[in-house]
Image: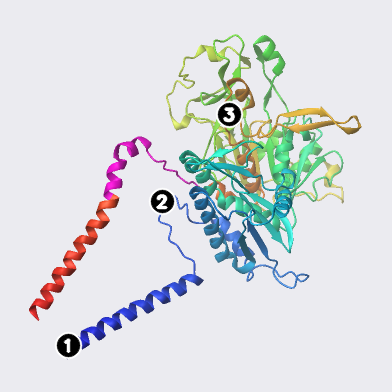
Amino acid sequence: MSKESTRNKLYNWVVFFIILLIVIFLNIIGTFVYQRIDVTEDERYSLAKGTIEFLEEMNPENAAKDKDAGGVNKLYIKVYLEGKLPAELKRFRNAVEDKLIEFREIAGDRIEYEFINPKKSNEADQRAMNIRLYNSGKGIVPMDVEYGENDENLQLWPGAEIIYNGVSRGFIQFLPGTAQGQVIKITPEFSEGTIQNSINNLEYNLVSGLRKVVKKGKPRIAFIQGHGELRERETQIARSLLTEYFSVTDINLSDSLDALKDVDGVIIARPKSPYSDKDLFLLDQFVMRGGRLMVFMDQLTFPGDTLNARGTVHTTRTGLRLDKMLFNYGIKLNDNYVKDANCGVIPVPFANTPTLPWFYYVAATSTSSPVAKNLDPVMLRYASELTVVPGNTYAVTPVLTSSENSTATMAPLISLAEPLNYGQKPVLNPNGISASNKRCLAAVSEGKYTSYFLDRISSSYRDNEAVTVLDSSQVEGKVFVVGNGSFIANYYDSMPGPGNKMLYRPSFNSMRYDEVYAMVERKKVLYGNQEFFQNLVDYMMGDNSVLDIRSKQIDLHPIDKEKVKEEGSFYQILNMVLPSLLVVIMAFVVFYLRKRRFARS
C-alpha cells in the first residue's frame, strides 16, 4: 500500500471523526438549550411581549422568595394528553409541550410539567380521577372523539391542572369539551378549525391560568349604584370575568365621602337618573388620585315597549350630568344615535322576512388600539357618537368606530319602518364610502387632568378638614367612555329558589352572540363584546400580560381544496420521484468523479 493511499485513508478517518464529534457536541448542546427561529410574517411562533415580561417576573432570579416555603414556589403543570392519540391530537399535544418548553426557558425551573395518560390506571382510580378533573363542571370538560377508518372511540381530558405549593389551584381547558352522548368526528375540517384555533390560543390559555395562581392581591373594582344602574343580575357575566383577577364590589356614592377611598377602578353601567354634585365630586377626586374610570352610558333614551307597540317613538335626553364632567376630560357625548349598514337585526311581524337589519344595532369596527385589535365586531345597541373636545390637552384615542357606510341622526323620532326605505344594499351616507364617515363609539382619555370642580368647589368640602381636595391629577389617569349603557348587560332567566328567593341565571355566552337572531334565524352571529370588555379592563388597570396576546394577529391560510383536487396528484408524484432522481444523479456524479480521479492515478 502506497504512502499516498495511507495518508488519504488517514485524512478521511480524521475528517469523519471531526464531523462525528461536531454532531455529538451539537446534540449535547441541544439537550440543554432550546432555540428556534420564527420566520413567519405574523410571528405566530414567538411569545408576546406581555408573556415574556410575565414569565421573567416568575423567574427565580427575579421573583421574591417565599420565607414560609423556604424558597421560590414551584408551579407544577399536569397535562392530561398522553397515550394513544390520533395524529391530529398528537400534533396538538406536541404544540402544548413546545409552548411549555418556551415558558420554562424564560421562567426557569419555577415551572415544571408532566404529561399524564389518564387511562393508565385501574378502573376505580380512573373513575376517581375523572371526578376530580371534572370538578362538577368547574375543572376540565372531557371530549369524546371518533377517528380512523374503524371509527374508534376515545375519551380525552384536553386540559391541564396547575399544582401550586402541592395544592391543586386551577384547571386549563385547551380543547372544547363535549356534552354527554355527543361525539366529535376527527376530520380535516376539525383539524384545520378547532385544533388550529386551539393551538393559536395556547399562549393565552396558559398565561391566563398561571396568572390566576401566582397573582398576589386583587385590585378593587366597584360598580356604582344608586342612579338606576344595571343590577347585579344584569352584569353577572361581566362580574364573573372580573372576579378571577379583581375584587368586585358595589358602592353607593351617597354612603360616605370616603366611598371610593380604597377603590382602584370604577365601572358606571347604564345609569338612569342624574348624578348630584357630591357624586360627581367623589368621582372627579377619584380620577385626580389616579383611579381608573370606565363609563357605559346612554345620552338618549326612549320607552322600548312604545316602539314595539306603535312602531314609532320619540327620544329624550337622559340628563345624567355625567357628560359634563367627561367633557372636562376631553370626551364629548353627542345627542344623537349612530346608524350603520353594518348592523344587527330585529324581528318584525309585518315584513316578508322574519328579521330586518336594524341600523341602530351597530356592529362596531375595531381600531388599531390594543383594546380592540383583531376582535370580532362589537355589538352596540343605540349608541351615541363621541367626539374629541377641541383644544383639550389630553390624549384621546378612538377605540371603536362605525363603518364607512354610517351616519349620525339628530332626529328625535325612531321608526320600525326605516329599514323598508332602503334596498338590499342600503347606503346610509350619500358622501360615498370614505374613512371620514366613521363615527367614534368608544374612546379612552389619558393624561394629568385638571379637576372638574376647580375654582367652584363648595366651601363645605373645601373647609372640611376630613376632605382632601385635589385641583389636578397626582398621577396620569385614564377615563374610558362607551356611548352605550347596556354594553355589558347580559340576558338572564329567573326561577324560584329556596326560601322563596328568586334565582337569576345568566344566559350562556349572551355577551358573545345575538340571542334574538339565534332564536329567529337558528344561527349564531358571534360578537367580540366579551373579549372587548376583558381587554378594556386589563388596559385600564394596567395589566398587559394577556392584552398583548389577545391583540396578536395570526393569519390562517386554509388549504385550497379545489386546487388540491386538480394538482394534488402531480405534487404527490413529484415528491416521490424527485428525491429518488436526485439520489441517482448524485450517485452518477460521485461515480464519475471517483472514476476520473483514479483513472489519472
For disc 3, the marked residue is: 524
Give the residue at the far bottom of this rendering.
3
Q: Give the foreground label among 3 and 2.
A: 3
The answer to whether residue 341 is visible is yes
Is residue 545 something one can see in this rendering? Answer: no
For label 2, the residue is 41
Q: Position of residue 178 (x, y in %)?
A: 63, 39
Please identify the quadrant where the C terminus is shown: bottom left
Magenta range: 553-574
Q: Position of residue 344 (x, y in %)?
A: 57, 24
- The residue that mark 1 highlights is 4
- Circle 1: is it few (<14), some (14-19), or many (20+) Cα within 10 Å? few
Identity of the residue drawn at 87% across and 51% down:
465
Q: Main secondary structure of the magenta part?
A: helix
Give the percent coordinates (x, y) of residue 109: 61, 69
At horizontal 24% and vertical 61% (from top left) the residue drawn is 583
Q: Specify the amino acid type for callout 2.
A: Glu
Q: Are marks 2 and 1 in contact (CB under 8 Å)?
A: no
Point out the image quarter for the N terminus.
bottom left
